[in-house]
Amino acid sequence: MEVLATELPGVLLLKPRVFGDQRGFFLETFHAARYAEVGIRASFVQDNWSRSARGTLRGLHFQEPHAQGKLVQVVHGAVYDVAVDVRRGSPTFGRWVGCELNEENKHQLWIPPGFAHGFVVISDFCDFLYKCTAPYSPEAERAIAWNDPDLAIPWPVAVPLLSAKDTAAPRLADAPLLPRFDPSPPSL
């Protein structure tokens, strides 16, 4: 597996090894020891699968408390995927990274706890899988406005399909509950 660091410390783009021939392909989507070797020592407790139509934008979501780390990937279609540092006190607070995840490149994105996550579908439809380090907690669910001008994310869809929750999400500057940045190194 090839691992690329992004501009946000801790957010990693993973390129699994794909073994293919005339029958199709095979790849490991997760192997605890191999992922631990590259710094992802997470215990995953929940797997999710969403299917969305072209132009659907889901995000920018996070949980506080009960922060979730997410290992995300696309198994059909394509998305523009974004992670935003929402940890108060972080040197990269309010910065974001984005990349295309699709069924052809088979890349994954690791989004550590303390980051908001979102994606927009850029294919006819998309099947999106993600592993989470904490269970979904409705009372801890938070969102940041996808079109926050302070973030200035260049989403590749001008008028996305949004949920009511995402339509009403506040700007980052107005978010009432944000995680705090912990400068100590993670425990091994």
Image (cartoon, rainbow, N blue to C red):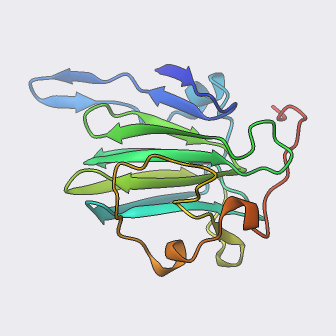
Residue at the (46%, 60%) spot, across then down: 48
Between 184 and 142, which is closer to the camera in this rendering? 142
Quadrant where the image shows the C terminus: top right
Residue occupying the point 80% across, 56% down:
179
Please indicate, yes or no, whether residue 150 appears anywhere in the rendered image. Answer: yes
- Residue 72 place in picture, x, y as percent: 47, 46
Q: Which residue is outermost to the left?
A: 22
At horizontal 41% and vertical 44% (from top left) the residue drawn is 73
- Give the x, y percent position of residue 38: 62, 23
Position of 56 with respect to 131 (left or right) is left
Locate residue 6: give its quadrant: top right
Residue 71: tell me if it is visible.
Answer: no
Up-down relation of residue 108 to residue 134 (above or below): above
Q: Is residue 100 left or right of residue 134?
A: left
Q: Is residue 72 above or below residue 32?
A: below
Nearest the camera: 114 or 57? 57
Q: Position of residue 42 (x, y in %)?
A: 67, 42
Question: Residue extending furthest top?
Answer: 2
Residue 83 % position (x, y): 57, 45
The vertical placement of 125 against 34, above or below, is below
96 or 181: nearer the eye? 96
Side of 80 where 42 appears, left or right: right
Query: Quadrant location of residue 32?
Result: top right
Is 47 left, or right, of 148 in this rendering? left
Where is residue 183, by image quadrant? Answer: top right
